[in-house]
Image (spheres, rainbow, N blue to C red):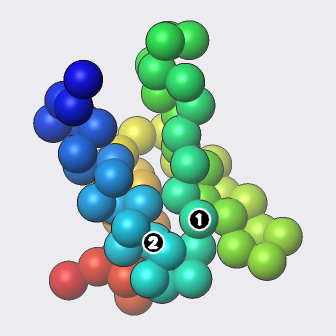
Amino acid sequence: MNTAEDQQFATLAARSALAGHSLVRSNPADGAAAYSAMHWGFLKMLPTLDAAHAFLVQIGGAR
């Protein structure tokens, strides 16, 4: 099952990887998804995909 949210997450995860960060999400079956960006021991919790996108812009990984 590939929803628009799944596709958006996959795109953000790929762009994050190109910027040197890992973007992961909790299991959507457990309730509202939560996102985390990681890089060399740094962990940033991101409550929404919009927050994940804003962080990607902040680190220079988004157009």
Q: Position of residue 39 (x, y in %)?
A: 70, 74
- Badge 2: residue crowd in 10 Å (few <14, some 14–19, many ≥20): many
- Badge 1: residue crowd in 10 Å (few <14, some 14–19, many ≥20): some
Residue at x-position 24% and y-position 23%: 1
Which tag, 1 or 2, sits closer to the chain's start?
A: 2
Answer with the quarter of the image where residue 57 lies.
Answer: bottom left
Residue at x-position 29% and y-position 79%: 62
Q: Position of residue 16 (x, y in %)?
A: 45, 72
Q: Is there CB contact under 8 Å for labels 1 and 2?
A: yes
User: Residue pushed farthest right?
Assistant: 41
Q: Is residue 47 left or right of residue 40?
A: left
Q: In the rendered view, would you say 32 is above or below 53?
A: above
User: Residue pushed farthest front?
Assistant: 1
Q: Which residue in the protein does label 1 denote?
A: 22
Relative to the observer, which residue lies in front, 47 or 27? 27
User: Residue pushed farthest top?
Assistant: 30
Q: Which residue in the protein does label 2 denote?
A: 16
Q: In the rendered view, would you say 32 is above or below 16?
A: above
